[in-house]
Image (cartoon, grey):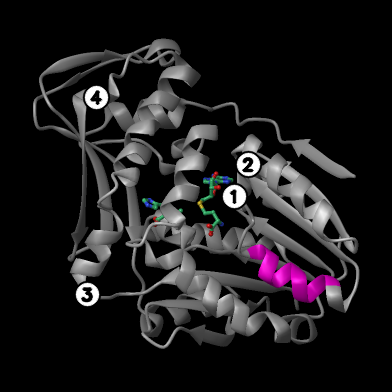
Amino acid sequence: MLELKTLAPPEAAGLDVRMGLLSRPKTIPATYFYDDQGSQLFEQICNLPEYYPTRTEAAILATLAPSLPSLTGADTLIELGSGSSTKTRLLLDAYTQAGPTHYVPIDVSRGILQQSAQALLTTYANLRVTGLVGDYIAALQQLPPAQRRLVLFLGSTLGNLGATECSDFLAMIRLALTRGDYFLLGIDLHKDQSILEAAYNDSAGVTAAFNRNILMHLNTRFGCTFQPEQFEHWAFYNSTMQQIEMHLRSRRNHVVDLGSLEAQIELRAGETIRTEISRKFDLTTFTPLLADQGLPVRRTWQDERGWFAVLLCQAV
Ligand code: SAH
Ligand code: AVI
């Protein structure tokens, strides 16, 4: 049986959108990509020929999975931003073979969480699933009891947080863990700019649709009056910041009403709204940051091209 808990939305829900759209330059938090449609589009992105992170990380996970149950001794796997849990199956194969396992997927996107959790229960007899619908930071404060935890944060979703947010987030993960618990983190590494830019400018236009869908989501959720066709998808590598940036560029001067967020914004022709950063990491500089937050790296796995890394950290 699937246990699904919905976490109370923060009192400030929507204020982050309002603040971002009233700032200069304008921004929208990337979390708002993920309504049902956004989650489906992200699944399509994962299968695009240009989007290397998913298949590269999956290959690494396939290699390390058999050794992970004995390495960690974990009975509970908690996944932050679990989405379709497709890659997680590689780990669940190994864990459920080793013994009964409790899986706790956490995601803001209810539909995909519910669907994937149900599907897991039909695959694995040895699995208990408790899904948490809501923000992973809130969820970290109410994790179910466990003997030994392994927290998963895959797909380089950590890269969608700015540097300060990232350190705070790691600190919160450490606080939620007991000494000896594990944290498995997937991060996308530096590589040729042309490969990075192609991954966020696919020829089928799926990433562009994903980017514009954030506006549809704000329209449905807050009654905003965005017209997505009035915006162009723009994604590029910012080499100074070492991050991909995704923006929506207004095709003309216009005004958008933010509905229940009680504001109006003016957009000039050519003005952009930044919808996402996707930081690319360097292991030499990033590994010490994990240790600084009480999560030193115990093992590192990479693909042979050195495009992606999976790090096993342990709470000390
Ligand atoms: N882990 C999957 C999905 C990555 S996409 C993979 O590696 O392919 C990022 C996921 O995080 C989405 O499913 C999205 O709904 C979820 N997400 C984004 N912001 C979130 C937040 N603040 N709290 C919980 N889930 C979030
Ligand atoms: C979820 N996250 C790590 C993806 C990324 O690559 O930053 C989201 C994405 N944005 C565009 N394509 C994929």
Query: Does the magenta run of residues contain 220?
Result: no
Disc 4 marks a residue whose amino acid type is Glu
Label 3 sits on residue = 192
Query: Sequence-wise, which precedes: disc 4 or disc 1?
Result: 1
Q: Residues within 10 Å of mark 2 (few under 14, many from 20)?
A: many
Q: Position of residue 42 (x, y in %)?
A: 46, 47
Mark 3 or 4: the one toward you? 4
Query: Sequence-wise, which precedes: disc 1 or disc 3?
Result: 1
Residue 193 image-quadrant placement: bottom left
Secondary element at tag 1: loop
Q: Which residues are magenta?
A: 88-96
Label 2 sits on residue = 112
Quarter of the image where the C terminus is located: bottom right
**Is 302 drawn above or below residue 250 in the view shown?**
below
Q: Indicate if the residue with disc 2 has its beta carbon within 8 Å of ligand 1.
A: yes
Disc 3 marks a residue whose amino acid type is Asp
**Is 307 drawn above or below residue 299 in the view shown?**
above
Label 4 sits on residue = 229
Foreground of the two, 208 or 291: 208
The residue at 58%/81% (across/down) is: 296
Label 1 sits on residue = 83
Kindly indicate whether the residue at mark 1 contacts the one at mark 2 (C-beta within 8 angstroms): yes
Q: Position of residue 165 (x, y in %)?
A: 44, 54
Q: Is residue 23 left or right of residue 267?
A: right
**Is 20 drawn above or below residue 256 in the view shown?**
below
Q: Any mark on residue 75, and which?
A: none
For the stretch drawn in magenta, the main secondary structure is: helix
Secondary element at tag 3: loop
